[in-house]
Amino acid sequence: MENQIIITETERLILRRYKKEDIQDLFEYLSDPEVVEYEPYKPLTLEEAAENLEWRISTEEMIAVELKSSHKMIGNVYMGKREFEALEIGYVFNRNYLGHGYAAESCKALIQQAFSNGIHRIYAECDPRNKGSWKLLEALGFQREAHLRKNVYFWKDERGKAIWKDTYVYAKLDADG
């Protein structure tokens, strides 16, 4: 196995930086229309996934989630640095691995690590229709702070008009425990 930068480990997972060998696993979930339904991008081709992987390798904000048992990379957690000692968290997982607690396990570990490193606030934005995402945030102890109405759009219709979407904003403070 090549030299990899491990951020932290949990009982079942290795949370690490991306590497070139992740291309097939990354393509597997980023090409799935169901997985990227609420993301600001369409399903990716293999070529687009390869370009995306280059960016993921170059940034510290994207964290690959790998199963210890099989060394398969099954998803990612995003931890974007923001002003005022804050982070934005996000996650995308291969749908074949949903329902096993991997997203919760990886997010919990990264949240604990962020707070122990002096982060004050972690927040997330999600589509209100993405029930799995906001249910996970609530299970992780995040509180819904806002429901922004028709505040963003990723796509336009055939006439070029914006397709507006609502956003839930969730946050967890270091003091929340």
Image: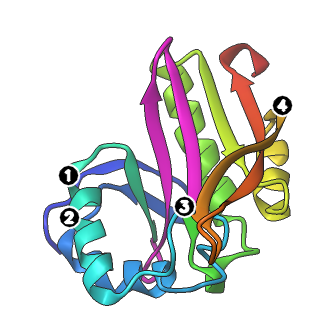
> What's the residue at 50%, 29% (across, down)?
114
Mark identifier at residue 58: 1
Q: Which residue is mark 3?
A: 40
* Residue 66 x, y percent position in the rendering: 44, 69
Q: Counting other residues with Cα less than 10 Å from the Cα at mark 2, is it few (<14), some (14-19), or many (20 or more)? A: some
Q: Is residue 163 above or below residue 93?
A: above
Residue flagged by tag 3: what amino acid is it?
Pro
Residue flagged by tag 1: what amino acid is it?
Ser
Q: Nearer the viewer, mark 4 or mark 2?
A: 4
Q: Counting other residues with Cα less than 10 Å from the Cα at mark 1, is it few (<14), some (14-19), or many (20 or more)? A: few
CB under 8 Å between discs 1 and 2: yes
* Residue 139 x, y percent position in the rendering: 84, 47
Q: Which residue is mark 2?
A: 54
Q: Quadrant of residue 96?
A: bottom right
Is residue 81 shown in magenta?
Answer: yes
Mark identifier at residue 146: 4
Q: Which residues are magenta?
A: 67-91
Cα distance between the residues tagged 3 and 2: 18 Å
Q: Is residue 43 above or below residue 86?
A: below
